[in-house]
Image: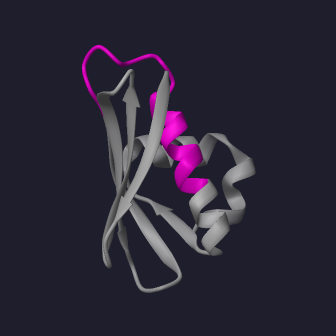
Amino acid sequence: MTRVEHEQNERKGRFVIYEDAVFAGEMTYTWAGTGKFIIDHTGIEEGFNGKGFGKKLLEQAVAFAREQEVKILPLCPFAKAQFDKDKNLADVRY
């Protein structure tokens, strides 16, 4: 079973994914003002690659952006590639 948790403080945050209570990866971000955040890193632990965990993390980040009515600047290469591929994410892209 996988689960994603969201941790944040005033300026930074991360979405963390676990599989069977084992840390499997994270997507980190930094707020840039009040209207957008920058996804700056996505990392999946060895042994968890190829399971779609990066996409699950991005789905959570996008859902969070939509809830908060803010934009995402995808600087991380993985996130940028997903935004470039999926036009359904255009509404939250900065």
Q: Position of residue 48 (x, y in %)?
A: 35, 18
Front in this rendered view, residue 40 or 14: 14
Q: Position of residue 86 (x, y in %)?
A: 68, 43
The quarter of the displayed image where residue 69 is located: bottom right
The answer to whether residue 59 is magenta is yes
- Residue at 48% x, 18% y is 51
Q: Specify whether 90 is left or right of 57.
A: right
Magenta-drawn segment: 44-62
Q: Position of residue 9 (x, y in %)?
A: 31, 72
- Residue at 58% x, 61% y is 64
Q: Specify whether 77 is left or right of 62.
A: left
- Residue at 72% x, 48% y is 87
Residue lying furthest bottom in this view? 33
The answer to whether residue 50 is magenta is yes
The correct choice, above or below, for 32 with respect to 82 in the image is below
- Residue at 59% x, 74% y is 70
Q: Specify whether 62 is left or right of 52.
A: right
Front in this rendered view, residue 90 or 16: 16
Task: Tell me the quadrant of the picture where the C terminus can be found.
Answer: bottom right
Q: Position of residue 5 (x, y in %)?
A: 43, 47
Query: What colour scheme does the image use?
Result: one colour
The quarter of the displayed image where residue 12 is located: bottom left
